[in-house]
Each structure stands twice: as structure tokens, then as C-alpha cells.
């Protein structure tokens, strides 16, 4: 929702829902539901107030669990606290969505300390719950975490298995963003196995989707991958061209280009001059 609303409209909606004393009249579901909008305008004080309010007005264990989860995420909750909440959520009637989300976050926290074995255990449990309730989008995100675990272990074959399943699900859901992301990840894994032609096809498909969606991050990831492949084959002009196109998209959208992109373009321009 936040991605589809302009900052001005987001402020208008938020003011309508929380202005004056109206924040006291909203329920837990709405308080948590508008957090992405509030994040999109960077009002951190209001985020804290909404999370605190959500906890205060929660009417059952499920709402208390979601509120507790948001509080832990935003206040540096420990891995053990997240694990405890996941265990509690699994004991609740209709607690599967909450438990799946908490276990997914638990896996990400474990990945941050490079405990891939434990991360895989948590995300597999999360995936089991997601699949039991038909949460396809959540399943795709869980597969992405499994793929990340495989990549960290340099198990490229397993990464391709997970990413291919993500790709098939995203296509079935007709979700272009998830489709774009999965294509790029398949491309990266194929490149790591030395399958450069296949990798190039995957990256190019991802780039085409990203351009159509005007998705800057997607354009950057796919362009970066294509530039890597071009440099491996000493096609420096091609690498320069694809990254220049990415820079132009950032300019067209009025978004500051990442410093890494600027530095790589500068290095390629210098190298291209030396080669010629």
C-alpha cells in the first residue's frame, strides 16, 4: 500500500486517522496496518506511539502477539525473545500466520549472525505454516531465505532449486516484482556455477521487467549482474552501456543514484579509455 501512495497522500491519510486525539479511537489492526504508511514519511515518533497504542488496545492473544512482534522488531528484541514469541504463537488457535511471520523474522536474525543451519530450521518451519494456510506470497519470501542460506554456504545447486520454485510461484501469481527478483537470483546462482549464457538470459529478463515496472532496485540488481558477466568476458563497452542505462533511469525518476554505481561507472569509463 505504502509504495502505491504519494508522500502527500500518505500524510493526508495519516493525519485523518491519527490527528488530534483520534489515535485513541483506532484499534490494533488499524494501528499496525498503517505502520508502512507512517514509515514511508519517516515519522518515527508516530510509529512508536502506534505500536504502543496497538499493544494497549489489543483485545485477544493474536492481536497481543502481533503488537508484541512489532514492538520487538522496532526495539532490538533479542533472538531468544523472538523465538519465545514464535513458540507462543504456535500454541494459539489461528496463530499460524503470526507464528509463520515471527519464525521468518527469527530466520533473518539468525542469518545476520551467519547461523545458516538454525536459520534454515526456522524458515522451513515458517514455510510449513505458510503452505498450510495457503500463503503463497509468504512462501515465496520463505524460499528466498532458504536460497540465501544456500548462497552463504556456496551451495549453488540448492539455491537454484529454491529460486526456480520461487520463479514458478511468482509467475503463477502474476506478481511481477517477485518474478523480477527471482529471475535475478536464478541468474546470480547460474553465473556462480559458470553457466554464463543462462545467467545472462535470466538477468536480461529481470532487467526488462524492472524497466517496465520502473523499479530502480530491480534495474540496479539486474544491470549489475549483466555488467559482471560482460566484464568476465572482457566486454567492457557492454558493461558500461548497461550501467549507463541504469544511471539514466535513476535520473529520469529523480532518484539519487547509489554511490557504488557512480564509482563503477567511473572505473569502467577510465578502463574503457585505457583499452582503446
Image (tube, rainbow, N blue to C red):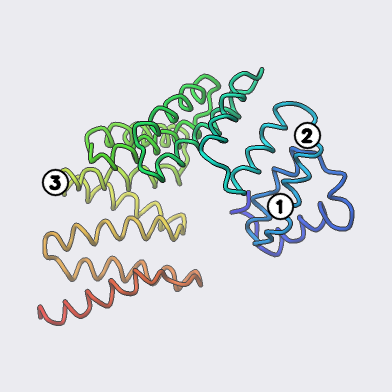
Of 157 and 62, which appears nearest the observer?
62
Residue 274 lies in what quarter of the image? Answer: bottom left
Q: CA distance from mark 2 to mark 3?
A: 53 Å
User: Where residue 38 sits: x, y (%)?
Assistant: 68, 55
Neighbour tally class for label 3: few under 14, some 14-19, many 20 plus, Cα within 10 Å: few
- Per the image, label 2 sits on a secondary structure element best described as loop
Eye-nearest disc, 2 or 3: 2
User: Where residue 132 sits: x, y (%)?
Assistant: 52, 19
Residue 11 lies in what quarter of the image? Answer: bottom right
Q: Is residue 262 left or right of residue 273?
A: right
Q: Residue at x 46, y 26 (%)?
A: 127
Q: Are marks 2 and 3 in contact (CB under 8 Å)?
A: no
Q: Which residue is mark 1?
A: 48
Q: Which residue is mark 2?
A: 58
- Per the image, label 1 sits on a secondary structure element best described as helix
Q: Residue at x 39, y 38 (%)?
A: 144
Image position of 69 with respect to 200: above or below: above
Q: CA distance from mark 1 to mark 2?
A: 16 Å
Q: Is residue 31 left or right of residue 142?
A: right
Residue 194 bears which disc, if any?
3
User: Where residue 64 sits: x, y (%)?
Assistant: 72, 32
Q: Residue at x 23, y 76 (%)?
A: 267
Q: Residue at x 34, y 50 (%)?
A: 206
Residue 152 lies in what quarter of the image? Answer: top left
**Sequence order check, earlier mark of 1 and 2:** 1
Q: CA distance from mark 1 to mark 3?
A: 48 Å
Image position of 82 with respect to 224: above or below: above
- Per the image, label 3 sits on a secondary structure element best described as loop
Of 241 and 267, which appears nearest the observer?
267
Neighbour tally class for label 1: few under 14, some 14-19, many 20 plus, Cα within 10 Å: some
Amino acid at each position: 500500500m505504502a509504495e502505491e501512495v504519494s508522500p502527500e497522500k500518505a500524510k493526508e491519510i495519516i493525519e485523518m486517522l491519527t490527528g488530534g486525539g483520534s489515535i485513541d479511537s483506532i484499534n490494533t489492526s488499524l494501528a499496525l496496518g498503517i505502520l508502512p504508511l507512517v514509515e514511508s514519511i519517516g515519522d518515527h515518533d508516530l510509529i512508536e506511539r502506534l505500536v504502543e497504542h496497538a499493544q494497549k488496545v489489543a483485545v485477544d492473544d493474536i492481536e497481543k502477539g502481533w503488537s508484541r512482534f512489532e514492538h520487538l522488531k522496532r526495539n532490538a528484541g533479542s533472538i531468544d525473545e523472538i523465538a519465545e514469541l514464535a513458540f507462543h504463537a504456535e500454541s494459539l488457535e489461528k496463530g499460524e500466520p503470526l507464528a509463520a511471520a515471527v519464525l521468518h523474522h527469527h530466520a533473518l536474525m539468525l542469518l545476520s549472525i551467519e547461523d545458516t543451519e538454525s536459520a534454515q530450521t526456522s524458515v522451513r518451519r515458517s514455510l510449513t505454516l505458510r503452505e498450510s494456510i495457503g500463503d503463497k506470497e509468504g512462501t515465496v519470501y520463505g524460499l528466498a531465505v532458504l536460497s540465501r542460506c544456500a548462497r552463504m554456504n556456496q551451495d549453488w545447486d540448492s539455491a537454484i532449486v529454491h529460486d526456480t520454485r520461487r520463479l514458478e510461484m511468482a509467475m503463477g501469481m502474476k506478481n511481477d516484482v517477485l518474478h523480477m527478483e527471482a529471475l535475478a537470483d536464478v541468474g546470480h546462482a547460474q553465473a556462480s556455477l559458470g553457466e554464463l549464457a543462462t545467467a545472462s538470459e535470466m538477468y536480461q529478463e529481470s532487467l526488462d521487467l524492472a524497466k517496465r515496472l520502473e523499479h530502480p532496485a530491480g534495474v540496479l540488481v539486474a544491470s549489475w549482474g549483466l555488467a559482471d558477466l560482460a566484464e568476465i568476458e572482457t566486454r567492457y563497452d557492454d558493461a558500461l552501456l548497461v550501467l549507463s542505462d541504469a544511471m539514466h533511469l535513476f535520473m529520469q525518476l529523480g532518484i539519487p543514484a547509489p554511490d557504488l554505481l557512480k564509482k563503477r561507472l567511473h572505473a569502467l569509463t577510465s578502463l574503457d579509455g585505457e583499452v582503446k
